[in-house]
Amino acid sequence: MSLMLLGILNSQAAGGGGVPAFELLATQISSGSTSSITFAGLNAYTDYKHLQIRYTVKNTGGATDLGIRFNGQTDGNYHSHGIRGTGSSVQARSQTFTSYVNFEYAMASSNGTDIFSSGILDFLDFANASTKPMLRAAYGYVNPAVFTDIYTASGMYSGSNQAISSITLLTFFNNFAANSRFSLYGIKG
Amino acid sequence: MPTPTHTLIEAVTLATSASSVTFSSIPQTYGDLVLALNIKPTAALNVRLRVNGDTGTNYNYVVMAGNGTAASSASAASQDFIYLDYTAYTNITASVIQANFIDYSTDKHKSILARASNSTTGVNAQGIRWASAAAITSMEIYAISNQFDVGSTFHLYGIAKAL
């Protein structure tokens, strides 16, 4: 690793002690023929307090929303809120009592072979069985030929209190394009 | 088996003021990169970014910002650099900035999610696309006017994607 600077500085090499607190648990990469991916068996991750999913994704068709479900539940008790920057205005957005957490415009279109949208989803205190499943998100898509968006958002399931034992990410139109990547991380607490 | 990650690649603390910091020879062994900055300015400045020394018009962005009185959003295509702080420019007080480079070592265009906060100028969230299929091997964080002051810190982390 080399470092170049136009000033004089101190630099310290990588390293440091302590117990690793951020760990990769699983990665799933779409082959282009699936409309959903699921991270299951999360109740086995007892070493972790929080989960994070980092993704890049595009649809095999047009730009569309990214859906999220907890524990395989398909009833209409999901909600989402967000603040959206469109490039010309800032909007407050929400959807209530849907059958999945709906993160609108989170998925890139097939326009532009190499252009994917990306996002980071945080599931804080995911194993708490005394609260509703929820998440927070940051995601964006920058393709002026289609549209540009930056979001901060949240989602929840308002049914019964429950720990999150599985997370499903899905598209309701076409499929996740090949090389869409979803990685799951655990954070100790 | 879980793979410990969020690994520190390089850390820099300025002992004298400087107009730029470059991380070079970035390892290609991670899925994502996380850049964390604590920028103290010698005077008001914007924090700019280029990757791989690319001075071409290959940077696109969308940003939403709040300055304490209004919210706004802007976007632009075909830029030859990217602001990491945008309207949350660094002025008097330090700005903290975090930028996530997703799938930086693949042949996808590089997607960057950034957040900047400054206690006097505002906050923003930004999506950036570097329109190149090349892997990111270096990045330069720089200022045009004024400098990053003594004590400014620059940290680069790697996040694994393969077990």
Image (spheres, helix red, strand yellow):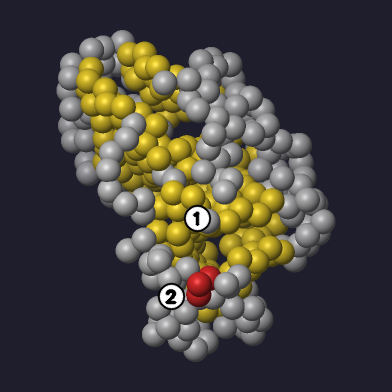
Residue A114 at least partly seen: yes
Question: Number of callouts in the render?
Answer: 2
Which class describes the residues within 10 Å of circle 1: few (<14), some (14-19), or many (20+)? some
Q: Residue at x 18, y 35 (%)?
A: B93
In this rendering, the answer to whether B21 lies above or below B160 is: above
In this rendering, the answer to whether B76 lies above or below B126 is: above
**Residue B78, percent from left and from top:** 60, 25
The span from disc 1 to disc 2 (Cα, nearest Å) is 18 Å
Q: Residue at x 43, y 71 (%)?
A: A46
Q: Residue at x 26, y 12 (%)?
A: A7
Badge 1 element: loop
Which class describes the residues within 10 Å of circle 2: few (<14), some (14-19), or many (20+)? many
Q: Please tell me in which quadrant of the rendered image residue B133 appears.
A: top right
In this rendering, the answer to whether A172 lies above or below A63 is: below
**Residue at image mark 1:** B2
Q: Are marks 1 and 2 on the same chain?
A: no
**Residue A18, percent from left and from top:** 28, 48
**Residue at image mark 2:** A127
